[in-house]
Image: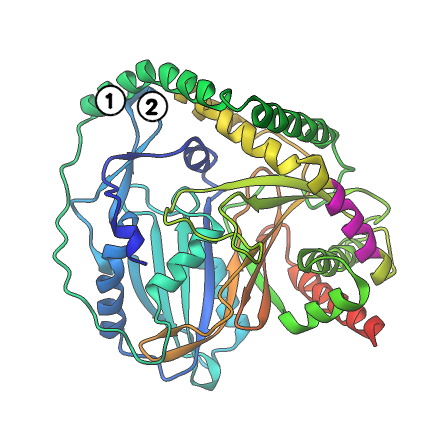
Amino acid sequence: MGQYCQQPMSFDRLSPLDASFLHAEDAVSHMHIGSVATFEGPAPGFSDIQAMVRGKLSLVPRYRQVVRFVPFDLGRPVWVDDPHFALDYHLRHTALPSPGDDTQLRALVGRVMGQQLDRAKPLWEIWVAEGLAGGRWAMVAKTHHSLVDGVSGTDLLAVIMDLSPDASPIPADDWAPGPVPSGVRLAVDAVSGLVRSPYEQLRAVRATTRVPRLALHEAADVARGLVTFAGVIRPTPKSSLNGPLGPHRRYAWASTSVDDIKRVRKVQGGTFNDVVLAAITRGFRDLLTGRGESVDRVLRTLVPVSVRPRASSGLAVGDGTLANRVSAMFAELPVRIADPVERLHAITAQMEGLKESKEALAGEALTSLSGFAPPMLLALGMRVATRVAQRNVNTVTTNVPGPQFPLYVRGRRMLEAYPYVPLAGQVRVGVAIFSYDGRVSFGVTGDRDTTPDIDVLCGGIELGMEELLARCR
């Protein structure tokens, strides 16, 4: 974990993708990701948790930095040290009223996640909630997407928590904020960066063309991916899944086990992610049916894909940075198919085709190309794109593998962890998937005004897994 300390982060400029998450945010689209984790009791003293977090802040410098925007959008925003950083603003303490059940915890998560992070302060909060039934307690965390993506977020989880029941020593903290640049300094630095940028881009192109075969191969892959992206332009049939968002959120979850998913894979084929998407498809089928809407339709989902380095197992891993490293594919969930195995096979065939089409590679290339756009136009474009009415994408389904070993906070074991995905662009329901210590959790976010029935979606996800397991027997 010491790798986070090796690179000074003061006055770092946000990447085009990171900046886009800030530009996409408005009064109803809050672009923070998060999680809710439950722990065995009794809860440690809040002062102990404060000391633990304070001792780990040196490993995640972004937690004490704020975003500064460049005057007139002449350059992308930068990270600078917060001279007024106060831990007690970001680390908060609350309790659930008796009986402290899951319904009350979900309501708390919905309220916390429905509140926009204050951009004048570091973009994160952690809420410690006591009073859960069975002596348990919870930790609700939210972090702005401009600071971290799902894969590097699992790195943060490991940094903040302990890897054994023996609480790690709390190091001394002698942090002092660096100087805060003036608006004039930011503008001058941005303009000089624009002058330097064409040279750097051309130099990178020349470096690539030194290996023409590789360059041509990658260009062909990107071109193939762009062809498949063209299909996303076609709108899907009108549905209650899309429309204007309100400022508040609902939150619920479903769960299964890693072993159950592996069992389905072994018997029915497909990948881990294919099985997950098949269960989610059953959930959306039930949701649409319950609303009296036809399932004889296209239901398109955005599937974020990590482009981080891969471990030998094929899983994306953190690379020691907190910047976003994600692209996207667009899949169609076959809600019209009633048979669970047929549904799974349809998803497997489709996902193999999408991978073969290099759609994620094309998405990464398009994201990289946004670095060429003047920051002022990039900011304006993202603001417009998230406000126009659209039916091209109906939902988002993001799957992040987490640690398959227990984590602890001051000796208390984390029992379960449920992820949270934000809503934007007139998408009213999103699903995040997170695996931890043998369990797979589905965190479902809904627009409070238009999705009072997200429990139907969660129930359908669990029924979808039960169907697939039954067919394995």
Q: 313 or 172: which is nearer to us?
A: 313
Please give the label number shown on residue 75.
2
Secondary structure of residue under mark 1? helix
Amino acid bearing label 1: Asp
In the image, what residue occupies the spot 70% across and 57% down? Answer: 271
State yes or no: discs 2 and 1 in contact (Cβ < 8 Å).
Answer: yes
Q: Tell me the crowding category of disc 1: few under 14, some 14 to 19, or many 20 or more residues within 10 angstroms, Cα based.
A: some
**Residue 293's x, y, as percent?**
81, 49
Residue 355 visible here:
yes
Residue 446 located left or right of residue 294: left
From the image, tell me which residue sits under label 1: 189
In the image, what residue occupies the spot 25% across and 68% down? Answer: 52
User: In the displayed structure, would residue 187 be above or below residue 160?
Assistant: above
Q: CA distance from mark 2 to mark 1?
A: 8 Å
Residue 114 visible here:
no
In the image, what residue occupies the spot 45% across and 18% down? Answer: 206
Q: 241 or 50: which is nearer to us?
A: 50
Q: Quadrant of the image for the C terminus?
A: bottom right
Secondary structure of residue under mark 2? loop
Q: Quadrant of the image for the N terminus?
A: bottom left
Region rendered in magenta: 343-353
